[in-house]
Image: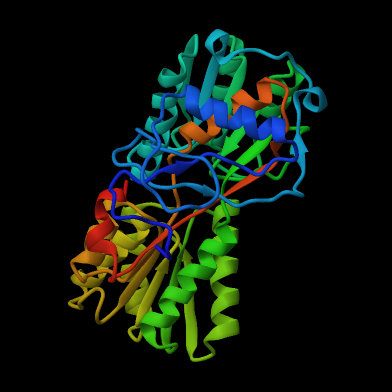
Amino acid sequence: MQGRWTDNKEVGLAMHHSLRSRRSLVALTAAVALSGAALAGCTNTGTPTSTNAGGGDAVQQTVKPDDNGPTCTLDQYGGTAIDLSDAVVGFSQSEKEDNPFRIAETQSIEDEAAKQGVKKFIKTNAQSTLSKQVSDIQDLIAQGADVLIVAPLNSDGLEPALKAARDKDIPVITVDRKLNATACTDYVSFLGSDFIEQGKRAADQLIAGTGGSGKVAILLGASGNGVTTDRTKGFVDEVQAQAPGIEIVAQQTGEFARDKGQSVTEQLLQANPGITAIYAENDEMGLGAQAAIIAAGKEPGTDIQIYSVDGTRNAVEQIAAGAYNGVIESNPRFGPLAFATLTSFLAGDAVGQDIVIEDGEYDPSNAADLVDNAF
């Protein structure tokens, strides 16, 4: 994990975002301590760390320092300073929880809400339907939510829900997917990964694994999603810049789903029998591609290499078994970081508008040792 992981299974979850004021750092560190999370063995990243109990063994979520990044305060956003123990917290999940990422994400947030002792925690699931997520958020507001944590389905389309929250000065923290909206105006902060960097790192893994040559197919995520756009851009730009011997022969959406990833890969292998590697923009599609490769009478990981983004246990186990080639982590355990950010913000301190975490990666050299850190 590029020096970021330790041999301890319970690797810490870093909670700090470099904020403009020392007061913010103190408040954020205090929020971590109040969550009851014990310090765990981890590499020294220069930031406070804690163990996240959500979703199985914890993994480290290190925040990229940004001393000069834009911040948001309660005074700027509007609203009233409150304690989370007196608050109603609403969480809007975007996708049905048949995906390990979503399961781990929801569990992490739910567990941290209990740990923080919030007065009431309400969760909804939009079942991958944008109109339902809008109505879900509006319903959370109607039920008296004082703060909202939202995992957006798409980068656009939530404007009516955001306006409903904005009209009541309800702070909104978004996780995992970034909105095409204005931070500290339409919402407070985004917490998540650098998706362009994830695509770039997946390309680097693939280039190293293939020796910089071959024919590659890309299984795209859902259309209209900023994660899809960024993971594609990072991958394609890096391949074009670093590996002119690699030809990208197809790009087709698998909608972040295993069954769709399998059916699309079956079609791609028939249309392009010379494919030597697949880049899937999440593990579920990568595992679907693996099934399609086996069905085509070829050996996954050898005849056709597979690289993806997420860090699910199923995919990491396949790397360890030699039937998969690489995974760039996208950490879903946002609970402690989301509540630490909210605690600091509601106390009147500045929080980053974009709190970007650094993710690890799995490959044949470390997958067997780190499988218990996967989700």
Residue 370 x %, y %: 28, 56
Query: 326 left or right of 30?
Result: left
What quarter of the picture does the N terminus occupy?
bottom left
Query: 162 left or right of 9?
Result: right
Residue at image point 22% right, 70% down? 323
Residue at image point 73% right, 13% down? 80
When the figure is inspected, residue 272 is found, relative to residue 169, above or below; the finding is: below
**Residue 100 found in image quarter:** top left
Residue at image point 60% right, 11% down? 142
Query: 86 left or right of 58?
Result: right
Q: How is the image coloured?
A: rainbow
**Residue 309 found in image quarter:** bottom left
Residue at image point 38% right, 56% down? 5
**Residue 187 found in image quarter:** top right
Query: 110 left or right of 82?
Result: left
When the figure is inspected, residue 373 is found, relative to residue 207, above or below; the finding is: above
Residue 369 x %, y %: 24, 60
Taking depth in this image into account, of 357 and 29 the one nearest to the observer is 29
Residue 314 x %, y %: 25, 54
Count of labels shown? 0
Residue 341, can we see it? no
When the figure is inspected, residue 304 is found, relative to residue 67, above or below; the finding is: below
Residue 334 x %, y %: 48, 37
Residue 329, can we see it? yes
Taking depth in this image into account, of 284 and 90 the one nearest to the observer is 90
